[in-house]
Amino acid sequence: MKKILSLLALTLIISAASFTASAQCKGFAKKVCKLDLIPYIHDGNYHAAILTEGEEAELYKTFYADQEYRIAICVVDAFPQIEFKIYDSNRKLIYNNRDHHMSRIWDFKPEASQQLKIVVKVPASGSKKSDSEVISGCVAIMFGIKDKK
Amino acid sequence: MFFKLKTYSSTPLILSAMLLMAACNSGGSKKTTEVKVDSAELAKDIFSDISNAKQIFYSLPSPMESAMLIKSAGATYNEKYLNPISNVSKYTSNKSMALNLGSYITDLSYASMFDQSQTTLKYMEVAKKMADGLGITEAIDQNTIKKLEENINNREAILDIISETFMSSTAFLQENDRQSLAAIALTGGWIEGLYLSTRLVGNEPIAKNKIVNRIVDQKLSLDILVKLLNNNKSNKDIAEIMPQINNLKKIYDKIIIKSSEIKTIEDAKSKITTLKSTTSSNISQPILNELSESVKNIRNNFTL
């Protein structure tokens, strides 16, 4: 019984921590990340997750012909060197932020509609850290579109 | 904003990772090398090497993007195709409220694209009712309506309010372990955008019709929608929606899209990269008619 109660308490604590973390992630995306999209208009989609060093997130999206887009990868200060790559539907690498001074923003215009895959990776820390601490933080992938009035 | 997680044992981390994952789940000008590949094959490829990424997102065009695509294809504004606000009292289940939250936000985005401010305002009111019914009171509140009224002649502010409304609604559902309802709202919005496109095609021949091109392009997003729904198929409401979407996919599967290889060219001054490629499809009037009929049936099923 004591074990069950302990497990229940642990689950509740973790659930509460997860909820707080994801709620903070939403606030971060709304208040900080949207600014990176200016002068483009945020499309209204929300894609954010809490990642830890060495982890990655993938996103699949169709980008439409003759629209102008901005992809902005928004991360907490703890992750200054986030890796950001884009592949086409033939798995060909079409953008790597390593070739663009680790930029977290990419502006582009497809001439034909394309299904693209965006891969964002938090690099593993080079220095050996204490096993007792792992740094995690919010990573958001945001899209802006040019409004053609 | 970052968090330092103490790792006393692996169990809490695994548990929290699972909970966090649950909380966060959605014609060219210049000739290029003509490597013609069927996009259906490409679609299989792009998903075939899904790695062990901690988080995988399937992103559909938002209501705002759907409305922009309709406008940029040269469509006109026609209020008769909107989901009537009088339907609002019919939506009492979570599924119908989520579907029509998406549908009404697409309609108000479409109206706002054509500067129809009073309609935008009326549709924001009904979207609020859907959000209230789903318990998303923080996404659309009286302040949202007030802000919209105060900025009724400021297009940029209106678009910002709409995008924030949609983001807050779906984010709230995702982080409250209701990701199935978030997926349903996205589905409702996407179907409404496709429905408006099929109604607004006009009489221009298919070969030159930009709206038809936009409808064909939705084949690519349909692949992503199917993945998104499959991820949530254990949910009863999603399971009810899936056969209708799968039927639509069967019709879309008749369309073969051929694309050339992408070449990237960055403009040194603007820093904007052009993805140069060409595309063509075998869309025909009978296939378009079949698609339009199927979309109409699904949309009527969602809204009536």
Image: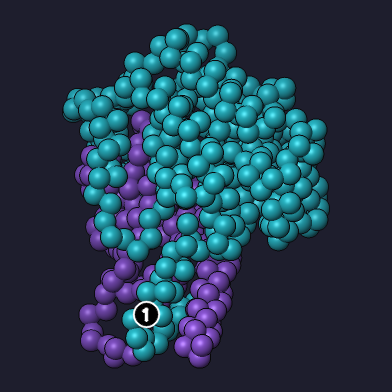
Q: For the residue labelled by badge 1, is the local secondary structure a helix, a strand or a loop? A: helix
Q: Which residue is mark 1?
A: B11
A29 sits to left or right of B49: right
- Answer yes or no: is residue A132 visible: yes
Camera-nearest residue between B156 and A119: A119
- The quadrant where residue A101 appears: bottom left
Please name the residue shown 76% across and 37% down the image. B90
Query: Mark 1 packing: few (<14 Cα in 10 Å), some, or many (20+)?
Result: few
Residue B296 sits in quarter: top right
Quarter containing the C terminus of chain B:
top right
Give x and y (percent) for residue B87. Answer: 76, 33
**Which chain is depicted cyan?**
B
**Residue occupying the point 40% across, 87% down:** B6
Which amino acid, by three-letter code, is at mark 1? Thr
Q: Chain of mark 1?
A: B
Image coordinates for residue B46, horizontal then vertical, percent:
28, 43
Q: Colour of chain A?
A: purple
The answer to whether one can see residue A107 in this image is no
